Amino acid sequence: VAYRNSSQPALAAPGLFVTQLLLIIGMAIGVVAALVVLSALAAADHRPSAIASKPGALLGLRGGGGVHDDGVTKPLVVVGSLNVDITIEVERLPKKEETVMASSPCTSVAVGGKGANQAAAAARLATGTGRPAVLVCEFGNDGYAETMRTALQEAGVDVSRCAHSAELPTGQGIVMLTPDGAASSIVVPGANAGWTAERAASLEELVCGASAVLLQREIPEEVNLAVARAACAAGVPVLQDVGGEDRPIDDELLREVAYVCPNETELERLTGMAIGSEAEILAAGRSLQSRGARNVLVTLGGDGSLLLEEVVRAGEGG
């Protein structure tokens, strides 16, 4: 089942309003992760639920699924990357072996990394709902670590489960920004590369008690797979943002997550298929479903988004 969301007239289908709402909120806060945060939390059975009057209302699962037996609201858990983004403004990008001067005398420094961005977006959307947004990441052994921690806490993110690397610095994103708003980046993984299997295993209780788990691809893939396995076994929906390192995605990981979320370029890279038309995007998305993905949410920039839902046939449950 495919639902299309766009600024242009498109398919009218049950559940389309969910995708529309996700897109509006995601564009409003400038973080694609917001699209997928709500799509998981809107339904305990992984399908779109009724529209809510306020965005925050979507952060509760139907049927009371967002509350522990002890009455404590289940957290949204983000396991992933943290970078310090260092932005350099330039008039144009340098050519090979060329040096260019920055157009500003100073760089700007901000919290970055797909994991940190997702957590900050989730904390903002959860304001007033009582649902914690918990980030699990690796801070580095440098001066940036405390700056990043403070900024995340001020954004409402729970960083109590984060760790510090003794050997590696905080990850960095070096961003070259041109006047037209285009950003070209190089990511230095730093402490994001320091995750271990033992560290991933220690998170089992946390992820199994979550309302949803968000992952990206800026930490080792074996960590994502271990977290996804634990969450899936506990019935916790997992959302995999496929942005990050350019690498194939394991079929087992596709089977363990509830939502796979690529943009057009990432979809083309993962499938090796053309994505020049909506029909081709649908075909590429379905190829991921044929490998085990249940729901595929493709973000299309200014053209909206496209959601391919899992089809549950009669007699198969749900």
Image: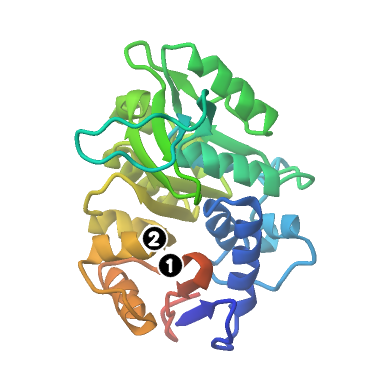
Residue 98 point in image, percent of width and height: 24, 33
Residue at numbered disc 1: 298
Q: Which of 212 and 316 is in front in this view?
A: 212
The span from disc 1 to disc 2 (Cα, nearest Å) is: 5 Å
The image quadrant where one finds the N terminus is bottom left
Position of residue 26 in the picture relative to residue 129 (left or right): left
Residue at 44%, 86% in the rendered image: 314
Is residue 249 shown above or below 8?
Answer: above
Q: Which of 254 and 172 is in front in this view?
A: 172
Under mark 2, the amino acid is Pro
Is residue 294 shown above or below 277?
Answer: above
Label placed on residue 262: 2
Under mark 1, the amino acid is Val
**How packed is label 1: few (under 14 Cα within 10 Å), some, or many (20 or more)?**
many
Residue at 40%, 32% in the rendered image: 173
**How packed is label 2: few (under 14 Cα within 10 Å), some, or many (20 or more)?**
many
Marks 1 and 2 close (CB-CB < 8 Å): yes
Residue at 37%, 50% in the rendered image: 243
Residue 121 point in image, percent of width and height: 61, 45
Q: Which of marks 1 and 2 is nearer the N terminus?
A: 2
Is residue 130 shown above or below 188?
Answer: below
- Residue 77 visible within the image: no
